[in-house]
Each structure stands twice: as C-alpha cells, then as structure tokens.
Image (spheres, helix red, strand yellow):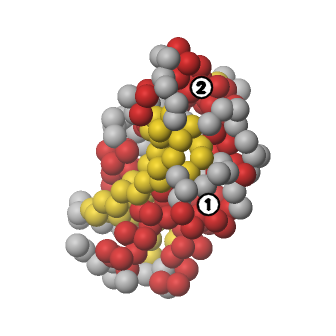
Amino acid sequence: MRRFTGDKLVVATHNHGKLEEFRDLLGPYGVTLSSAADHGLPEPVEDGTTFVENARIKAHAAARATGLPALSDDSGLEIDALGGAPGVYTADWAETPAGRDFVLAMGRAHDELLARGAAQPWVARFCCTLVLAWPDGHDEVFPGTMSGRIVWPGRGDGGHGYDPVFQPDGYDITFGEMERSEKNRISHRADAFAKLVAGCFD
C-alpha cells in the first residue's frame, strides 16, 4: 500500500459540494485540496462498466494533467432484483433534456421492480469506490458499501439522488429522512473513506 506523503491533492470532480466534503474529511491531515474544475480540466468520458473503472478513468486523467496525486470516486445504487441495476448508470437513469430528475429515476426503479414481479424485500446497496492515483500511474483502490432495501413510496426530503427510497439495514428510516451527519457517518462513502485513510494517511 503506497502512503500519501505530499501536501497537495486534486479531487477529480467538477462538483463543488463533493470537493467541500473531501476538504472536511481530509482537513486533519494538512492536505490542500483543489478540484479538476479549479485546474480547468475537462470531464473525461466515463465509459467503464464498473465503479472502479470509472473512478480510475477520472483519477488518472487528473493526475496526468496536473502532475499531482488525484482522488476520485464513483458511486451508485445496486438493486439485486434488477441484476445490480442501475449500478454505474445510477445518474444516467435520472438524465432528461432539462437536467437530472431523480424523482423520475426512483420511479423507474420502482416500475422495473413491479414489472419483474420482484418479491419484497427489495435488497439493495449503495456502492462507492475511491481511487487515489499518482502521476506515475500507480493507484490504490478503496471500495465501500451500505446495504439496505428499496422502499416505496419514498420518504423524506433530505439527502439527494435515490436517498428517499433507500432504507439502510438496521434503521427504520430512509437516507432521505436521516440527519446528514448520521448518514455521512454510516454511508458507503464513509466506509470507503475510512479504508482510504487507514491505507494511505494514518
């Protein structure tokens, strides 16, 4: 496992919220974070078929372009009764000509479960894969998951994406009903991040 020894890190994202989330998480380690957008980098084509492939595409593109280590994540929702869909296409299911519509995406997931006659509980998991890549081409991969089930109708207006229809194991509320601090403590991203810190920072 390669340790992170520098003081600058690029987060391979154009999402300001995601950059701030990583700043909060890596703040104690004295690392200065910038985003791919800060460096004027284009968004690479994510044509992988797995979370790790897409995360690697983003991390290595940013590391090559900046000459700095780069951190990326790729995440999504897997529903067992749908053969793991939407998976890497989690955000794509929400795409419309007017932008992303996750109410539409949640409805599609529910419709497909009904169309398949899938028996409840509708077992699912959120997945997150973090990749830390160096300019020399080396990388370290950290997968995280949060298991649960799909519920319908959705509950709560917190979180984002599919959160209102995802009830994590051990809870009787959805991510959409959960306080953000609690969700961030138990989420798939928290799981992956704990592994990243243990492997490369602690």
In the figure, 21 relative to 152: above or below?
A: below
Q: CA distance from mark 1 to mark 2?
A: 23 Å
- Residue type at the position of mark 2: His
Residue at 71% across, 26% down: 98
Residue 68: quadrant of the picture: bottom left
Q: Is residue 156 left or right of residue 16?
A: right
Name the residue beneath numbered marker 1: 183
Q: Which quadrant is home to the N terminus?
A: bottom left
Q: Is residue 129 visible?
A: yes
Q: Nearer the viewer, residue 24 or 175?
A: 175
Does residue 157 appear to the left or right of 144 in the view shown?
right
Crowding near the residue tagged with mark 1, few <14, some 14–19, many ≥20 C-alpha atoms within 10 Å: some
Image marks 1 and 2: residues in contact by CB distance under 8 Å:
no
What percent of the width, then of the height, locates residue 135? Answer: 29, 64
Q: Earlier in the sequence, mark 1 or mark 2?
A: 2
Residue at image location 33% in from the left, 35% down from the top? 49
Label 2, secondary structure: give it.
helix
Tell me which amino acid carries mark 1.
Lys
Name the residue beneath numbered marker 2. 110
Q: Using a 10 Å C-alpha cutoff, classify the residue at mark 2 as few (fewer than 14 neighbours), some (14 to 19) or many (20 or more).
A: some
Report if residue 66 is visible in the image: no
Residue 44 percent coordinates (x, y): 42, 43
Above/below status of 3 relative to 113: below
Count of numbered tags: 2
Which residue does the image show at 34% across and 40% down from the upper left? Answer: 50
